Amino acid sequence: MMKEQVEKALEKIRPALQADGGDVELVDVTENGVVQVRLKGACAGCPMATLTLKNGIEHRLRQEIPEIKSVEAV
């Protein structure tokens, strides 16, 4: 159930990442609310990827789904 919510939220974030030549793939959502994602394309090697992950993706997901504790790149 939470995985579906996360996927829908990521769909809203993707256009901004894709505009910069990157993307994000949902890998898993753990039982304790940790979202695991894989950054792809330009995002994978970008020095700002950690900032994008925490300030962008994690912030947006936590706004929509308060149960999320954190977002990690795997």
Image: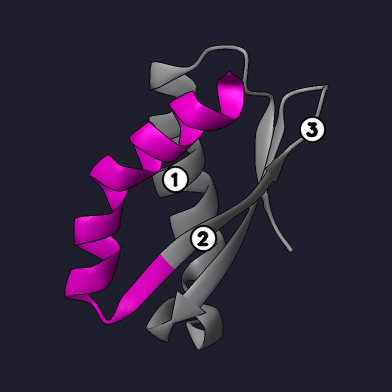
Question: Quarter-wise, where is residue 11 in the image?
Answer: top left
Q: Give the percent coordinates (x, y) of residue 16.
A: 21, 59
Looking at the image, is mark 1 or mark 2 earlier in the sequence? 2
Q: Residue at x 35, y 76 (%)?
A: 22
Q: Give the percent coordinates (x, y) of residue 13.
A: 29, 48
The residue tagged 2 is: 25
Asked if marks 3 and 2 touch (Cβ < 8 Å), the reply is: no
Check disc 2 and report its element: helix, strand or loop. Answer: strand
Check disc 1 and report its element: helix, strand or loop. Answer: helix
Instruction: Identify residue type, mark 1.
Output: Ile
Give the left or right position of residue 68, taking residue 60 as reference. right
Is the residue marked by circle 1 packed among few (<14), some (14-19), or many (20+) residues within 10 Å?
Answer: many
Is the residue marked by circle 2 packed among few (<14), some (14-19), or many (20+) residues within 10 Å?
Answer: some
Q: Nearer the viewer, residue 37 or 53?
A: 37
Quadrant including the C terminus? bottom right
The residue tagged 3 is: 30
Q: Nearer the viewer, residue 24 or 52?
A: 24
Find residue 57 and name its label.
1
Q: Give the percent coordinates (x, y) of residue 32.
A: 82, 22
Q: Residue at x 27, y 82 (%)?
A: 21
Q: Which residues are magenta?
A: 1-23
